[in-house]
Amino acid sequence: MTPDTKESDSLDQAVRTRRERRDRWQQEGERSIAQNLAMIGALGWTIVVPTLAGLFAGRWLDRTFSAGLFWTLGLLTAGLAIGCAMAWRRMHGE
């Protein structure tokens, strides 16, 4: 595949996705305020839960191995990155 063909395929896919979203919006209509607030809340928890899990696991490892803040900072960052990636995927799936 040449670069031009790859760009053309990705453009075709983008147009198809846009058309499908527009058609779905025309059929279903706009989401209510409650649905939007529910999505915002779910996205918040999608980010917070992995971040807190990383924080607690890191604190436990640091206490167990007397490592200072080594594991806490690393797992906190990893949890935040995972949570943001999950939220990003969910938003693009909507």
Image (cartoon, helix red, strand yellow):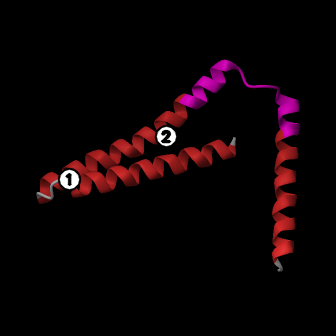
Position of the N terminus by quadrant: bottom right
In this view, the mark in front (1 or 2): 1
Label 1 is placed on what type of residue?
Leu
Label 2 is placed on what type of residue?
Thr
Give coordinates of residue 49: x percent, y percent: 41, 40
Q: Which residue is mark 2?
A: 46
Residue extending farthest to the front is 4
At horizontal 15% and vertical 58% (from top left) the residue drawn is 67
Q: Residues within 10 Å of mark 2 (few under 14, many from 20)?
A: many
Circle 1 sits in a helix, a strand or a loop, which is it?
Answer: loop
At horizontal 22% and vertical 58% (from top left) the residue drawn is 70
**Residue 69 bears which disc, if any?**
1
Whether pointer 1 and pointer 2 mark residues with C-beta atoms closer than 8 Å, the reply is no
The answer to if 38 sits in the magenta stretch is yes
Span highlighted in magenta in the image: 22-40
Nearest the eye: 58 or 27: 58
The answer to if 86 sits in the magenta stretch is no
**Residue 13 bears which disc, if any?**
none
